[in-house]
Image (cartoon, helix red, strand yellow):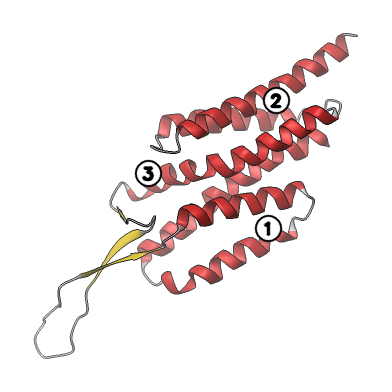
Amino acid sequence: MPFEILDIVYWATIVVFLAVATVFAIASIRRPRAAIVIVSGAFLAAALALAALPFDPLPLPVTVGVAGLSLVIAVVGGGPAATVVLEAATRGTVTQGTHGGILLARSDRRITDTPYVAPAKTEEVMRGGLVIGVLERLAIAASLMAGFPGAFAVVVAVKGVGRFTELAESESRERFIIGTLTSIIWATASAGVWLLAVA
């Protein structure tokens, strides 16, 4: 009997931790703040650690709930997390564009005897990052939860090929790598809660 009560507490705690992580992630969507993202990440990490403990597998209704919350936190929480990590890495020196990309100033040096540099043209690169990130995290978490980890590599490859022409500047390369790694880590941790809990 005590083990049954302990199992119920274990299952409920995982669900509560995921729900709290999701609420904080949703709260940070409009204005990603480091403190809110850290709290969300801490509850996600606590749920992941708890799911790794050797308890009986979750019953079906709880499994469905944990699966749903894991997908939601993977999709919703990864965007603010990537934004906060990118802000910390670039120290606010990268200007955001109107379409979710970054603004880069590009100047063309003319080949002449004078050191004339044409005025810099501002160009937005890495557009659509928000939508791409959402789809990336959804595909990664869903493929891991469905037992197809090979799809993980396909998602990353498609993203890399799609962004290839925009990665000439160091700012866009750094942003691509940091954002992608943050997004992948968040989605993998989210899917990991469900994978460990049902194992």
Task: Look at the picture and state if 100 lies above or below 162.
Answer: above
Q: Quadrant of the N terminus?
A: top right
Residue that badge 2 annotates = 14
Nearest the viewer among 131 and 163 is 131
Residue that badge 3 annotates = 88
Residue closest to the far right: 1
Residue at image position (59%, 46%) is 185
Q: Secondary structure at mark 2?
A: helix
Q: CA distance from mark 2 to mark 3?
A: 30 Å
Q: Quadrant of the C terminus?
A: top right
Answer with left or right where residue 199 lies relative to residue 122: right
Residue that badge 1 annotates = 152
**Amino acid at circle 1:** Phe
Nearest the viewer among 180 and 126 is 126
Answer with left or right where residue 39 lies relative to residue 116: right
Residue at image position (41%, 38%) is 30
Q: Is residue 159 visible?
A: yes
Q: Is residue 42 visible?
A: no
**Amino acid at circle 2:** Ile
